[in-house]
Amino acid sequence: VHPPHSTRRRKRRRRSARPTRWCRVDRSRIARVVRARRSAGMSASRARLVAAAATAATCTASSALASNAGSSSDESGAAVPFLTAPPPGARPHARLAFVQLLTRHGDRTSINPLPMETREQWAHLLPDERACASMTASAAPHPPNPTLLDAKREAAWHGQLTTKGVEQMRDTGRALRAWLVERGGIDILPPTLEEAVATDAVKIRSTSTRRTVQSAQAMMQGLYGVRNATPGASGVAPGRESLRIEVRDRMDESMFPNPGMSCKRQIELMKSLDGDEVVKAAEQAAWGRKTLAAVRDRVHARNVDKRRRQREEALRELRAVKEGAKPLVDSSEESRGVDSTAGESTVGEQQVEPVPTSAARGELPAHLERDPRPPSCTSVWEPLQARANHGLALPEGVTGADVALIRRAAEVRYINRATNAEGAGLTGGRLLRELADELAAFALNGSRTRLSVYSGHDSTIIALLAVLGAFQGEWPPVASTVVVETWRVGGSGRLHWSSRALGRVGEGGEMVRVLFNGKVLPLPGCAGQDPTHRGGLCALDKFVAMADERDPRDYKAACKPRSKSKL
């Protein structure tokens, strides 16, 4: 007798859902890692996260070794769509009042290109002058013509937003419109760009890189429509009918986890944490793939050659200074010659401080005295993922499974860093404080702004999730978002004057929740948070108190190195 059709279908589904390869979990190794982390003061849940990540990296390595060359693909690094969550079920009468949106930019070219990469391979994927001018018609930097850290890389095409990235961010803007303009019961934003400008309903901040500025501009095109503009106007100030984008000096930027790599204590912590067994094991698993090791070796050879050429040029410059043929310059002038790829997590992998390439101050920069270290997994994975996202050919022999493997090794490194409370406070505390202060000002003063956009990087999102205690180990794909929603669950307007005078936050019934790519996050430091499956709201005053606790108020003092060794 044959089983019923429904039973047969269930069995077929179960069989098809089984993995084709099994990875044997080394439970004793997991237990050792957990014990070591627990003895160092880490919570049990975070210790298990680090151990599981390391095991997953090893499993991914086994799968990659077993896969046939060219037979597997990987889409995990591709852009994610903007998603919202249902209204908080535990507070059925709550009304959305204010939204803070942190985004990672859209797809881009490689920041640290592989030796075989050329501008010609990417040229057809870059937006033309007309497209750039059109983006400026909706939103433009203010003050105009800010100093962008990747401006000198424009001719070299490194780290630039592609047409695919532009469209991804427009899609995010369209999704925002459907949510905040057109959805009944929410509609907190005005329907036109002109009204948004006139009422200050939208506020925008961006880091000082071209790809994040353009990502914010493309998002506004999706939110309020594409406008025509004259090519060559990309640096103009915003007009009366365009939104302003605040661009800060990099040293004042809270969206850079370590601006200018100036926080020496953070560098100490990174070096210490990156030497942990789980991180080394994950990287060894990646370099165990001959194809990935070959790419690393080619990148390293290119970096060594570049460093030696810089050294020779600096030595010639130094001789000219000593002979009086060239005058000394001060540090501010020399900083124009600093090589920086600011923003992405790869920055922290390759340099521990801004890298001057000039000897015009009368001395040879210390880093030029030695050859560079071999590149980390993050530095090799970054250009591979950028090429995979755009359908460009990978180096010979490298497969999608290889890209997944090396990405997982990079994730292990950042999971391990995120579990350190001091490091999380240094990297994300200033941004969390800025968000909390903006929320408090909204609750106390009734600001007209309803959407506050922060256009940043993968490292920005990782840093914020880490300081919230909510980083689960997934590398933020391009176009990822962290949304901080403020809901009004009591009262109908501004606080009573007595509450404002006393500086009380949250007494008007404001509550907050945080979403990563549409998923409501648990906030371990936010006392009394509703269960995430019931909406995950937390009282605003508790959220502000959490930010107070986790932000190192005296950032400069907290960044002083603990060891006596020279970094």
Image (cartoon, rainbow, N blue to C red):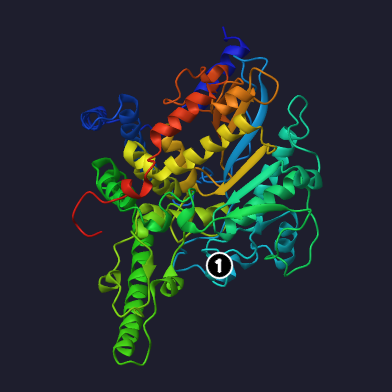
Residue 67 shown left or right of residue 51 in the figure:
right
Quarter of the image where the C terminus is located: bottom left
In the image, residue 555 lies at what x, y percent? 37, 46
Which of 431 and 513 lies nearest the eye of the viewer? 431
Residue 344, percent from left and from top: 47, 53
Residue sitting farthest toward the left: 564
- Name, please, the residue furthest toward the top: 1
- The spot of residue 261 in percent (x, y) is 38, 57
Residue at the (26%, 30%) spot, across then down: 30
Nearest the eye: 433 or 408: 433
Q: Which residue is tagged 1?
A: 151
- Residue 44, above or below 170: above
Task: Judge whether residue 120 can be spotted in this image.
Answer: yes
* Vertical side of 325 occupied by 55: above or below: above
Question: Residue at point 42% right, 47% down?
Answer: 407
* Quadrant in the rendering for residue 162: bottom right
Say which residue appears at 43% left-offset and 33% top-offset.
548
| Crowdedness near tag 1: few (<14), some (14–19) or many (≥20) residues, C-alpha within 10 Å | some
Residue at 70% over, 21% down: 492
> Where is the N terminus found, in terms of image quarters?
top right
Quick one: 325 or 410, which is closer to the camera?
Answer: 325
Q: Pick whichever, 394 or 447, lies toward us.
A: 447
Q: How many marks?
A: 1
Q: Give, as a three-letter code, the residue at label 1.
A: Ala
Badge 1 marks a residue whose secondary structure is helix
Horizontal relation, residue 548 to residue 123: left or right = left
Give the x, y percent position of residue 399: 46, 52
Q: Is residue 20 visible?
A: no
